[in-house]
Amino acid sequence: MPKHFYKLWSLFLLFVIFNAIPVDLRFNSNILSKNQNSEDFSSVLPHPSATTLLWNFTSGDNVNSVSISSDGNYIVAGSDDNNTYLFNKTSFLLKTPIWKYSTENHVSTVSISSDGNYIVAGSDDNHIYLFNSSKNNPIWNYTMGDLITQVAISSDGSYIVAGCNDNQISFHRNYSHTPLWNYTSSDKIKTVAISSDGNYIIAGSGNNKLILFYRTSNETSWIFTAADDINSVATSSDGFYIVAGTNDGDIYLFNSKNYPFPEWSYSTGDAIKMVGISSDGKYIVAGCENNLTYLFEKSNAFPLWSYTTGGPVLSVAISANGEHVLVGSEDNSTYLFDKSISTPIWSYDTLGKVKSVAISSDGAYLAIGSDDDQIYLFYWSATILEEEDDDELDIDFGEHAISFSNFYLLFMAIAILSLIIIKKNKLLFEKPPS
């Protein structure tokens, strides 16, 4: 065979071996070898995140309440400047509302339908206002006997419920200001909630009562009596699971079909300011006067975790799937959590206590209302870690991958052997014939 054949073959062999070594191993001596016993923390810890302030808007006074549509497209806010504001999510340096509407007193509570088409606001002028998102003139308003404590709206905006300091609950259809029914308690109604389809209405009162209604009538389905006032209620989308927080620090989880004994209860020792529940009812969040936020799974009365902020927790929100929790505190900060870990994955400091927070269904859009007169909208996303192309050759080296140092020695040994072969063949062909 020609002597050049051996040279070419050896060089080709070197080229193949060199290119078979992964790029990271060729040039990065810090690569760690993996084996079957190594821990993959990506399944335990949340992905790294990137959070962007899309916009903030300055109202004329403290912001009392914010609410966000499921897709994050629309944000509504109520302020002590007597205005209800509607915004879209579009980022703009000098953000302006789509519209605003002025009432005769502070707007204390707002809620938006999941599709963003309807907005309900409750004002200290004793009125409930219902809006269509396309215009700022109310579809209707309804006068109650005292301050409106809380409003809630079904997912499609068809049903509206409001609670009032005059002990009244008022239940409406969106086409008329005339209530379908009213209910009178023996004490003020502090909190209300409604299922996505509007079939279940829940209310908590100042006389320690948690009350469940079915939408067809003001006759109560059941009443539960706690040891203290019911400060906050929330329900799963289907209305089957109900969570309530009391003034003496108790958190209760109910199944609406089980009259009316709680699935479990948990005592925090201090007043519960607000509760929330995921759409499927699997995760429950509660914010407490003792600066603690608690996250529960519905199957267990003991918290998955708790976290201490620098002040009382005034507002909580949870994404539809329960993956993310947003918390607003009197310490002027907002905190975002992944359900799997008690350490915040993001926080933001304002110049006033954070009275209200809201989160889109997928956890991507975060709305904040603060006593610094600001309404904020953030966009949060997990950082996607770059992966190798699927087209690249994936070689399985068995249980233990070859470390870089061993790979380098192997490569050098083959290279030296190839050079010896080249030299030997060169001498063989250059030897003169005898």
Image (cartoon, rainbow, N blue to C red):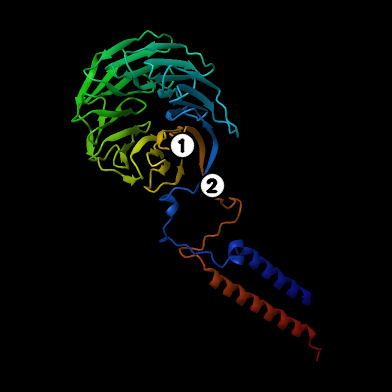
Q: Quadrant of residue 286?
A: top left
Q: Position of residue 213 (x, y in %)?
A: 28, 18
Q: Nearer the viewer, mark 2 or mark 1?
A: 1
Report the front residue among 119 and 58: 58
Mark yes or no: residue 217 visible.
Answer: no
Which residue is at a point 41% across and 8% down the rendered structure image? 176
Look at the numbered discs 2 and 1 and tell me whether their residues touch, using CB distance below 8 Å: no
Report the front residue among 283 and 247: 247
Q: Which residue is tagged 2?
A: 384
Which label was assigned to residue 164?
none
Q: Tell me the quadrant of the picture where the N terminus can be found.
A: bottom right
Q: Secondary structure at mark 1?
A: loop
Q: Position of residue 418 (x, y in %)?
A: 67, 76
Q: CA distance from mark 2 to mark 1?
A: 16 Å
Which residue is at a point 60% across and 65% down the rendered structure image? 21
Q: Is 417 situated above or below 325?
A: below
Q: Secondary structure at mark 2?
A: loop
Q: Is 261 situated above or below 266?
A: above
Horizontally, residue 423 falls left or right of residue 44, namely right
Which residue is at a point 37% across and 33% down the rendered structure image? 278
Q: Position of residue 194 (x, y in %)?
A: 35, 22
Horizontally, residue 89 falls left or right of residue 176, namely right
Q: Is 185 situated above or below 339?
A: above
Q: Residues within 10 Å of mark 2 (few under 14, many from 20)?
A: few
Report the front residue among 311 and 33: 311
Mark yes or no: residue 166 visible.
Answer: yes
- Residue type (three-letter) at the residue carrying disc 2: Ile
Q: Which residue is tagged 1?
A: 363
- Residue type (three-letter) at the residue carrying disc 1: Gly
